[in-house]
Image (cartoon, rainbow, N blue to C red):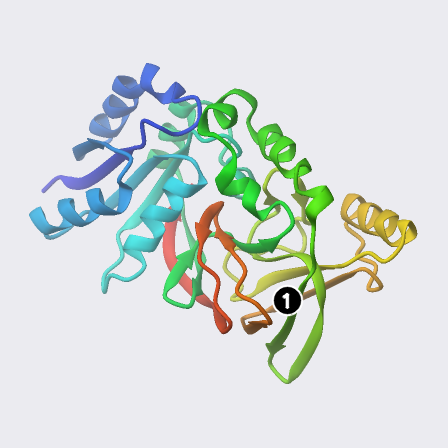
Amino acid sequence: MKKRMLFIVNPCSGTVKIKDSLLDICQIFCEAGYDLTLNVTKYISDAIKEALSQASHYDLVVCSGGDGTFNGMVSTLVSLEEHPSIGYIPSGSTNDFARSIGLNGSSIDIARQIMTGSPRKLDIGAFNQLYFSYVASFGAFTEASYNTPQSLKNRLGHLAYILEGVKDLSTIEPCRMKIVHGDEVMEGNYIWGAVCNSTSIGGMIRLNKELVDFNDGLFEVMLIKMPKTLIDLTKIVVSINTQSYDPDVITFFQASALDVYPETEIPWTLDGEYAPGSKEIHIENIHDSLQIII
């Protein structure tokens, strides 16, 4: 019996360069022995649910799009009792997750890589009742992720996020919150924070590759404190650029779970997509949740 594959392409993502090679990619998948179902849609979650309602099983689900598209696939599949293997052909503006996990080259190259690659376990994040594949973040520049016009993202890539984020500089206000992980309790005023499983965040912040393991059951947590002086601001910039985090201005630790209690409800982004805030947020690492072919 042939193996079954569901291939979902987001036509609104990034520069949509995949459209020029879509037939070649489908041929690669079919020649590898897959019975292929193709769906071109921006409604990723609905497409997966509909396909699964019509067929009891897929051996592999592949999506092409940006980080938000990948989030849609992951969020839908992680709640299933049986998880098919997944593949990802990045075609977004920034592609943080793809860059982190080593998915490089043309769409055709990555399609071949999926057909010949090896399975790799992935941790997935739970954010209250939602999910994220690589980052949950708040604070300065967070709104840039979902306010940047798609046309600008398509033309300028991650530079678009920087340009949109610069508008926030004059209006940055710290987020007062309490964070609990394990036996530790910390409180502070933070201008930005992220719970992540990636070496790249928003195309602007990079983490040391030696610190990030995609299936170790741990998230890397970075909290940038409100700078009080220009010296503090300089320390923040140097810390981020050198990946050596000065505890005076940046709190950095690893955790499998944490609870966040902000004084006011603030917006978050999950994999670059808007998520509503709450005064009680539980974030947990779902260890070895899915299996990606790379």
Residue 147 at what x, y percent from top left? 50, 38
Q: Along the line of sight, which residue is nearer the eye, 226 or 70?
A: 226
Q: Residue at x 67, y 80 (%)?
A: 185
Q: Report the residue that reaches farthest toward the bottom.
A: 183
Residue 233, given in percent of the width and then of the height, sits at 84, 50
Callout 1 environment at 10 Å: few (<14), some (14 to 19), or many (20+)?
some
Task: Identify which residue, 109 or 257, lies in the foreground.
Answer: 257
Q: Nearer the viewer, residue 287 or 247?
A: 247
State the image quarter where residue 122 is shown.
bottom left
Q: How many marks?
A: 1
Q: Is residue 102 visible?
A: no
Q: Label 1, on which residue?
A: 254
Q: Residue at x 48, y 62 (%)?
A: 277
Residue 288 visible in image? yes
The foreground one among 213 and 234 is: 234
The kind of residue tagged 1 is Gln
Q: Quadrant of the C terminus?
A: top left
Q: Quadrant of the N terminus?
A: top left
Residue at the image position 62 percent from the left and 29 percent from the top:
159
Q: Residue furthest right?
A: 231
Figure quadrant of residue 174: bottom right
